[in-house]
Amino acid sequence: MSRSKLRQHRGASDPIAAFACLRDAGVLGDYSYLHLSADHTEIGWAPIEHLRLLAGQPCDDWRDQLARFALRAEQLGRKAFGYIGFDAVAGHVGTLPDGSQTGRPLVEFIIPGKTLTFRESGVTHQGLGGIDLSRYLAASMSPMASRAGAGSIAPVDGTPEQAYVGMVRKGVAAVSAGEAKKLVLSRYQAYDADFDPVRLFAALSPPFVDAFLICFGDLAAVVPSPELLLHGENRAIVTNPLAGTRPRGPTPVEDERLRTELMENHKEIVEHVVSVNTVLAELAPICERDSLVVSRFMDVALLRKVQHLSSVVRGSLAAGHQVLDALWALFPAVTVTGLPKRKAIEIVRSLEPTPRYLYAGAMGWVSGAGDCRFSLALRGLFRCGSRSFLQAGAGILAESVPEAELLETSYKLSAMKDALAAAVGFEPVRRNSGDRDTPRADRKGFDPGAAADYCPPVTSIV
């Protein structure tokens, strides 16, 4: 296949508006994505090749198949973009948390034939064919007018709160008995809600480390991820584990009080330190000797509803190892499983009554043996057909209070639930052609100072 051409478009453009316009015009087709990362935004569509695994039967070599797919993408001068569901770790087929569907892919990637890359200097279009994208790049998002009675939605299914409290009690007992040092237990909510996923994506509030809108067939995933799982560039790797949580305060004074409480709480500090130590132990066998460093330790990452203890770990891949070896060492992340990881996963599966599907998996891209970017599929919404799912978890130690862990999951669920209620309760209105929004080509949500980092200073109040 011949390499595609690059076309440059000068000037600022709103990538979300461009995505909506391309979709509404039927240009994107059934498989497309929108990815906001630290230094650019990318739209991809028109897949050249498609990898779809663990969709109807187990597949023991799915990791090898993805590695070959990544090399194929590099040969084509592109990347492989997609997701790996949490339940892929056991080689299961994809089943929705409420059991309403099964046989859905847990590993799905495309190699896009066309991409638009948005930077402050302009937009780069890669792809074959002579389509003129100028009018799509000039698009702007219209404001939204509310519908009567909008703004409140209720789940149609989910993990009952008391069932979750009971689950946590069993988890505390398991940790106290020495079966594990930490467990991460989650609960889900399901909604039958009619909404536009692009509108929902546009309503997301920063900060986030990566934001994903993945439209693969009847799957629409809207994920403003708070946690970088792995960034690889020229064999240098970085990961940003978050562990230890407090809610945001309603006032700056209360916010600061909660932050101080987070940084001084024994349970939260232990949870974070053991997570960082686990990441170091997982990466050590595949990294060059003495290359692993904790470049930032126990900062506080400030999100809309919660704040987390945050550290950054860096290293360099040793000879004979590929960037996906680092991903497999980290996946699924200790911050969404517990430790020792293998035993924790076993206990989590015995206590959580439902599959996790894509929740707590990984989303992002990989190209060749040395480059990738994956973030955890957390704080997001997954719509499969007409049903949508939210899910959140909490880290469980021997000193955990079950009711407090339930409250933590409520804080985590609330941001996306609020955004979903707004997307369901609002509809676009017409605007005059001259009434334009300010272009937002730099809609990144944060400025970490480096493409791979996400550790906002504690003075950032968002």
Image (tube, rainbow, N blue to C red):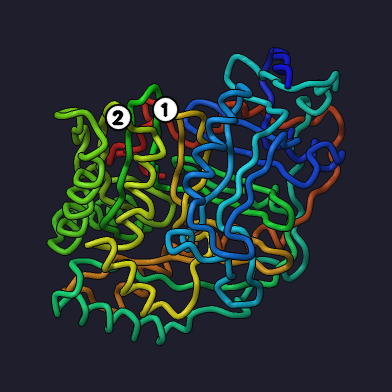
Q: Position of residue 198 (x, y in %)?
A: 70, 47
Residue found 53% across the figure and 58% down from its top: 59
Under mark 1, the amino acid is: Gly
Position above or below: 24 against 133: below
Q: Say whether disc 1 or disc 2 marks the residue closer to the N-terminus.
A: 2
Tell me the CA gap for discs 1 and 2: 9 Å
Q: Are marks 1 and 2 in contact (CB under 8 Å)?
A: yes
Q: Quarter of the image for the C terminus: give it.
A: top left
Q: Quarter of the image for the N terminus: give it.
A: top right
- Callout 2: SS: loop
- Callout 1: SS: loop
24 displayed left or right of 271: right
Q: Which residue is mark 1?
A: 370
Q: Which mark is residue 317?
A: 2
Camera-side residue of 16 and 437 = 16
Q: Position of residue 209 (x, y in %)?
A: 44, 40
Under mark 2, the amino acid is: Leu
